[in-house]
């Protein structure tokens, strides 16, 4: 065992079940489609117009990504209108999985006609979506905050029909029973859990992650999606285990960022992070000819390390989530290689000390390249740690205790990069003249 103190296994199981859920396409446009579909459902008549107000981070993550199942259409208006023409709100993050040709054609027609107005909402949570829909006789609004399916308010004709605040007292007891405590996570606790949990407790969610994410990864390798980062790497760098691990992660993002309709099992609210924590681990496990149980235990390490690091950064930030996910994958590869707590901690530290500064400038095809860079850094970090090489305390953000290093990086991602996030958005929506600033 890695520690005499064992964290609550039930808490870690709950975290995995809450985090590893299916989603189709980039989660931000899907969240917009979900809000719009829910607003249409609430309206109860044929919509005439929709206004979507979004936080800067939502705009950043939807502007450049192809909306899945849309026939190649991009942008916030497309996501919202497709949620109306082809959405099923009951499916949440798979809301537009059933959109057909008629829905796609009607979506394009309505977007071209100016059916959807999009605004930048300021002084709101990082993840904020308001879908205001108007019909002939009625109006409705659905507001999502903090999490992609977390509806906090619904109104019809200006009358409040649902409010998280109003139901808070009743919900608290239920939340206490069902919502896992991420503040209780530690690296030692994660490793204790990975070693000791009864695999049947989580085998279903892990098997689904392998199945879904392998399928979209293969799709990215087999066909032309995005900038073809995964395919290019295999063609140029060869078929060794390191290249396969990086390429298969990148290929899943190639497909996903360019509108592939295949579902992904997410991590920390992100499909790209879900792909990054799973595909390199699967490739290395197969290369090592490990048992299914050993693979599952390694995936536990990868998923939970990623969630742990991302918890301190927050759901949306200027800090690229591929880095925290790659830390998880590197930690799991070290775990499968027989590394102990120190080796695994050093793998995380070495990764964060290398690529901790990658910025997120929205969801788009280049995310695949950022995944490739992050996984490459994590594999280097693993190879360093297994040779007892590591970055030392006092070097930049690195501390002697990996837990403190993780917190340092979390602070930079959540607080330090907040102004960076704001300026990235300003550049993306043409609110600044960068030449005038030089």
Image (cartoon, rainbow, N blue to C red):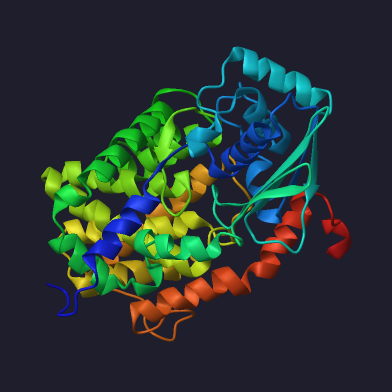
In-image side of 5 versus 416 (left or right): left
From this viewpoint, which residue is outermost toward the right? Answer: 436
Q: In which quarter of the image is the N terminus?
A: bottom left
Percent across and percent down for residue 417 are 62, 69
In-image side of 35 versus 185 (left or right): right
Residue drawn at (55%, 68%) of the image: 413
- The answer to whether residue 388 of the structure is visible from this angle is no
Percent across and percent down for residue 113 are 84, 23
Q: In which quarter of the image is the C terminus?
A: bottom right
Which of the two residues, 240 or 204, is positioned nearer the viewer here? 204
In-image side of 376 versus 239 (left or right): right
Which corner quadrant of the image does residue 47 belong to? top right
- The answer to whether residue 171 of the structure is visible from this angle is yes
Residue drawn at (77%, 23%) of the image: 110
Residue 216 to residue 386: above or below: above
Percent across and percent down for residue 397 are 47, 79
Percent across and percent down for residue 262 are 44, 29
Residue drawn at (80%, 27%) of the image: 48
Residue 423 to residue 287: above or below: below
Which corner quadrant of the image does residue 198 belong to? bottom left
Total count of labels:
0
Which of the two residues, 295 or 77, is positioned nearer the viewer here? 77
Which of the two residues, 163 or 261, is positioned nearer the viewer here? 163
Which corner quadrant of the image does residue 351 belong to? bottom left
Residue drawn at (48%, 32%) of the image: 255
In-image side of 30 versus 213 (left or right): right
Residue 272 to residue 70: above or below: below
């Amino acid at each position: 065992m890695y520690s005499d103190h064992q964290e609550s296994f039930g808490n870690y199981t709950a975290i995995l079940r809450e985090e590893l859920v299916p989603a189709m396409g980039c989660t931000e446009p899907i969240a917009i489609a979900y809000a719009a579909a829910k607003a249409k459902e609430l309206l109860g008549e044929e919509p005439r117009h929709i206004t979507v107000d979004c936080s800067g981070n939502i705009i950043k993550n939807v502007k450049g990504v192809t909306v899945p199942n849309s026939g190649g259409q991009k942008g916030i208006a497309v996501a919202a209108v497709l949620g109306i023409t082809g959405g099923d709100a009951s499916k949440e993050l798979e809301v537009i999985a059933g959109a057909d040709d008629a829905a796609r054609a009607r979506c394009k027609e309505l977007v071209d006609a100016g059916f959807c107005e999009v605004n930048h909402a300021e002084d709101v949570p990082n993840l904020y979506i308001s879908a205001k829909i108007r019909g002939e006789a009625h109006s409705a609004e659905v507001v999502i905050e903090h999490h992609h399916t977390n509806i906090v308010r619904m109104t019809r004709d200006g009358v409040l029909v649902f409010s998280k605040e109003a139901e808070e007292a009743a919900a608290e007891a239920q939340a206490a029973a069902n919502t896992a405590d991420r503040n209780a996570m530690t690296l030692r606790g994660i490793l204790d859990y990975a070693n000791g949990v009864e695999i049947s407790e989580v085998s279903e969610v892990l098997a689904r992650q392998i199945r879904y994410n392998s399928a979209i990864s293969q799709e990215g390798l087999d066909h032309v999606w995005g900038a073809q980062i995964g395919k290019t790497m295999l063609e140029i760098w060869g078929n060794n285990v390191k290249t396969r691990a990086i390429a298969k992660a990148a290929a899943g993002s190639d497909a996903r960022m360019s509108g592939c309709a295949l579902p992904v099992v997410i991590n920390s609210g992100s499909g790209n992070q879900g792909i990054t924590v799973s595909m390199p681990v699967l490739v290395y496990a197969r290369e090592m000819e490990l048992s299914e149980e050993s693979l599952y235990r390694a995936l536990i390490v990868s998923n939970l390390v990623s969630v742990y690091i991302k918890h301190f950064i927050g759901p949306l930030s200027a800090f690229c989530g591929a880095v925290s996910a790659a830390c998880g994958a590197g930690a799991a590869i070290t775990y499968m290689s027989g590394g102990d707590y120190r080796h695994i901690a050093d793998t995380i530290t070495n990764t964060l000390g290398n690529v901790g500064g990658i910025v997120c400038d929205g969801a788009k095809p280049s995310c695949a390249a950022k995944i490739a860079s992050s996984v490459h850094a994590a594999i280097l970090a693993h190879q360093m740690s297994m040779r007892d090489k590591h970055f030392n305390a006092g070097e930049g953000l690195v501390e002697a205790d990996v837990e403190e290093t993780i917190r340092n990086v979390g602070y930079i991602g959540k607080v330090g990069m907040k102004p960076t996030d704001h300026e990235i958005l300003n550049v993306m929506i043409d609110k600044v003249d960068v030449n005038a600033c030089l």
